[in-house]
Structures are given as structure tokens and as C-alpha cells.
Image (tube, rainbow, N blue to C red):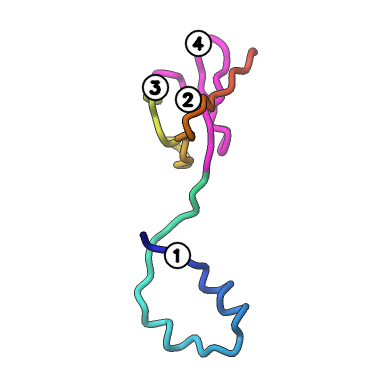
């Protein structure tokens, strides 16, 4: 599995290194893995992303959706029910 580092933070830590030889290495388009969970609101059931707070009708998001369609937050859990019920 590939590992990615923040190059700017790396070079701040090792200021004596010459950055020029490393600028020719290919870069990867990566993003931070953001975790979230679905928050259920009343009837008709609305789902809210705990990360971006965007609201969706239940039918707009697949029942077993693993990611928020708006911000891409990872909704997968570690085997525990990670859905909150909010009574409006």
C-alpha cells in the first residue's frame, strides 16, 4: 500500500535538504480520508451528513451508501451502527 506524506511539512522538519531533486518526482492526487455518519431526522426521513451538514431525502441516498454524495465523507463503520436518530 502506498504511503503519502505532506512534502511541505517534511521539508520544514529537514530544512537542510535541497528540495530541487525532489521536485521532479511524480505527484499523486490524494485527499484526506474524512469520516462521517448519517444523522436521521424525523418523517419524512431526512438524512444529514455529520461532516458537511447537507440534508438528503432518504430515497436520494442509497440505504447502504458508503459515502456522502456532497462532500465524499466515508460513512463506513467498524461493524457498529453509526447512525444517529434525531427527533424533530
Residue 63 found in image quarter? top left
- Could you say which disc has been placed on residue 4 in the image? 1
Q: Secondary structure at mark 3?
A: loop
What residue is disc 4 on?
Answer: 44
Q: Earlier in the sequence, mark 1 or mark 2?
A: 1
- Horizontal and vertical percent position of residue 87: 64, 13
- Circle on res. 63: 3
| Residue 52 is one of the magenta-drawn residues | yes
- Give the CA distance from mark 1 to mark 2: 33 Å
Which labelled disc corresponds to residue 56?
A: 2
Quarter of the picture containing the N terminus is bottom left
Q: Position of residue 7 (x, y in %)?
A: 51, 73
Counting residues from the start of the chain, the first of labels 2 and 3 encountered is 2
* Nearer the camera: disc 3 or disc 4: 3
Disc 4 and disc 2 in contact, CB within 8 angstroms:
no
Q: Quadrant of residue 12?
A: bottom right
Circle 1 crowding by C-alpha within 10 Å: few under 14, some 14–19, many from 20: few
Task: Tell me which numbered mark, 3 or 4, is placed earlier along the sequence.
Answer: 4
Dot 4: element: loop
What are the residue bounds of the magenta stretch? 35-59
- First-in-chain label (1 vs 3): 1
User: Residue 81 or 42: which is nearer the viewer?
Assistant: 81
Amino acid at each position: 500500500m502506498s504511503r503519502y506524506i505532506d512534502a511541505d511539512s517534511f521539508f520544514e522538519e529537514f530544512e537542510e535538504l535541497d528540495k530541487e531533486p525532489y521536485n521532479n518526482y511524480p505527484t499523486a492526487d490524494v485527499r484526506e480520508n474524512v469520516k462521517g455518519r448519517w444523522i436521521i431526522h424525523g418523517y419524512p426521513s431526512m438524512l444529514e451528513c455529520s461532516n458537511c451538514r447537507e440534508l438528503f431525502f432518504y430515497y436520494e441516498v442509497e440505504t447502504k451508501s458508503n459515502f456522502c454524495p456532497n462532500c465524499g465523507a466515508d460513512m463506513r463503520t467498524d461493524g457498529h451502527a453509526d447512525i444517529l436518530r434525531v427527533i424533530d
